[in-house]
Image (tube, rainbow, N blue to C red):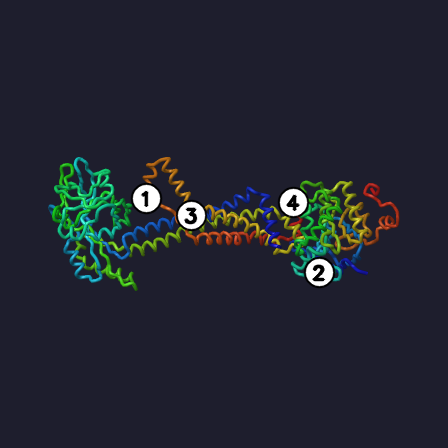
Amino acid sequence: MNYATQVQQLRKTYELKGETVHALNSITFDVPEGDYVAIMGASGSGKSTLLNMLGCLDRPTAGKIILAGDDTSTLTDDELSFIRASRIGFVFQSYNLIQQLTVIENIEVPLFYRGQVTAQDRKRCIELANMVGLGDRINHRPTQLSGGQQQRVAVARSLINHPDYILADEPTGNLDSKTTEEILQLFERLNNEGRTIIIVTHEDDVSQHAKRIIRLHDGEISFDRLNEHRRNAISGEMIPTASTVS
Amino acid sequence: MLWLRTLNLGIKSLLLHPMRSLLTILGIFIGVASVIWLLAIGEGISAKAQEQIEGLGADNVIVRSVKPPTEATAGTRGIVPYGLTRDDRDLLIETISAIEKAVPIREISRQFSYGPTLIHGRLVGCTPEYYDMTQLEIERGHFISDRENERGDNNCVLAAEVSEALFGYKDPIGKRIHIETDYYTVVGVLKPRVATSAIGGSLSGQEFNKDVYIPINTLWERIGDRIITRRSGSFEGEQLEINQITLRIKTNNKDNTTAILETADLIRVSLEHHDRMKDVAIVVPLELLEQAKQTRLMFMVFMGLIAAISLMVGGIGIMNIMLATVTERTREIGIRRALGATRSDIVRQFLVETIVLSVVGGVTGIIGGLLCVPAVDIVRDAVTAYDATLMASMPEVVQEVSPQIVPISIPIAFGISVIVGVIFGLYPAQRAANLDPIEALRSAN
């Protein structure tokens, strides 16, 4: 089986006012290609730390993160930057679009840090904008878009570099239930197309869309199992929505 | 390509805050323009001084009679003879072989009249060499000739203004004008000549246009050495043979400077007997020229320093703004880092912005600097139009300065502005790059 990422004995400690804080304590799990994983946990459970590590924004104190076969725990800052630019797609809670750039320019930002931007890349940016339903707004700026639209731009941006996986950090935290549903359906569609998605959330409704749920507690995995709801949905049942589940 | 995109991005970011960018550019603009302005004005002033000195002739040494200070003549009664004598002239010519020519002049303030018309002016007794030496130009007739001087003819040459005042549009040649007790036949009229201004106090300015020239021998014979001036009931007198001797030094092309300076020293020694009275001054244009060059250099360094300070201030302005920008855009930096920007990408992005600011400031500053020459004229005209007496009361330097752009100052100013941009931009850019991407992403901005 091919893995999008493999997390092995991952450990992260911080020094805080002379005290050692164990944010993550020997975590091990694999994410196969095409999986849709929800990482859950209360605040302080270590999920943000894990997200930073999976996003190659931070390095582990011990253990390994293997990205499609490459160990990232020993890479330099510049090498990690290149991995972020070319192999990881980020979606953030507060969209994190660059305000002075248009929709299309925001989508192509990762390309810029990956190297050359070809005409084909440009075409793909437009295709992605069309895919997330913003084909007619490519020259708008983020301030001219609604929250849901901005998040869709962020999703398009995360796809531009054909990432090994999409890493979404509370992607619906700032959205109302209707747009939450739209974004989650977009993720599902992408997952159905074979893309790997790791979503970090504290909302059960959101996690119910994933195929698998990992729950963290005090820096350790307390729960890692397949999501029956979603499994059933795939086999033909109705997909539970935010409204029906609550 | 990468740089082009970064540049495009930088310009976009700067345009987001047009007023802020404009004010930052203004700092550099003023710095660069002031470099060019100050150097141009400095150059204009010193070039003018140099030109004046060169007008005296770099190969010449000028010895002048000066009125002795009162303490030197204290205790003597009556009119005390002073200054250069005919013996001094002969002594110099006979003892110093390096002197090629010695041109003496005697000048007296006099009234010239033709019929009922009167004009005050300077009566100059001179030899024919004076014509070349002071770069006079004849309009009609001829200048005083050697023969006229030897014979002591009662002939005279009029300067333009004297001729016009006494004769108007009539031809003065052959007419006789009245000076003191004698009549002099006009043999020539000069073209108007630009006045020279004073140089360093040792030579007073000369007006030339109110002069009447007669052979020096005639002056010595007819008027003599003793001049009595009646002034509101009291008498004032002076006894003086020669006002000034211009000595032309023979030069071998090899080493003019030392030859002239050595001869100048010899002349000083020969005229030592005047030291007691302090009634002779020696002016060596070459020395003045050397001094002027030194002064010019000092001036340039000084002006350059002032300009450098203003550029520095501009640079600090850039740094200040960029630091504020970095703080303001912490979030953006976090996003870019998360999306794969390396530290050097961030440095480049912010550095490009400062360089754009400083280059735009530099280019507009150069344009502003080049406007120096017309701008000075416009300001001068405006002040004159507003209040002519104010302008007249200004020092001569202010009235007459014409800035000369120093070509090298343009690339220097531009180069410095870019360097200032890089140096002062580097710190904010580094600071941006060293932000922790995780922290930056959490930032509210």
**Which mark is in front, 1 or 2?**
1
Q: Are marks 2 and 3 in contact (CB under 8 Å)?
A: no
For disc 3, the marked residue is B37
Q: Chain of mark 3?
A: B
For label 1, the residue is: B396
Mark 4, secondary structure of its residue: loop
Q: Secondary structure at mark 1?
A: helix
Q: Is residue B427 left or right of residue A117?
A: left
Query: Which residue is under mark 4?
Result: A99
Q: Chain of mark 4?
A: A
Residues behind callouts 2 and 4 on a single chain: yes
Q: CA distance from mark 4 to mark 3?
A: 41 Å
Q: Label 2 amino acid?
A: Thr
Q: Chain of mark 2?
A: A
Q: CA distance from mark 1 to mark 2?
A: 76 Å
Q: Earlier in the sequence, mark 1 or mark 3?
A: 3
| Residue A205 percent location from the top left of the image | 80, 45
Residue sitting farthest toward the bottom: B254
Q: In the picture, which quadrant includes the N terminus of chain B? A: bottom right
The residue located at (15%, 44%) in the rendering is B184
- Circle 2: element type: loop
Dot 3 falls on a residue whose secondary structure is helix
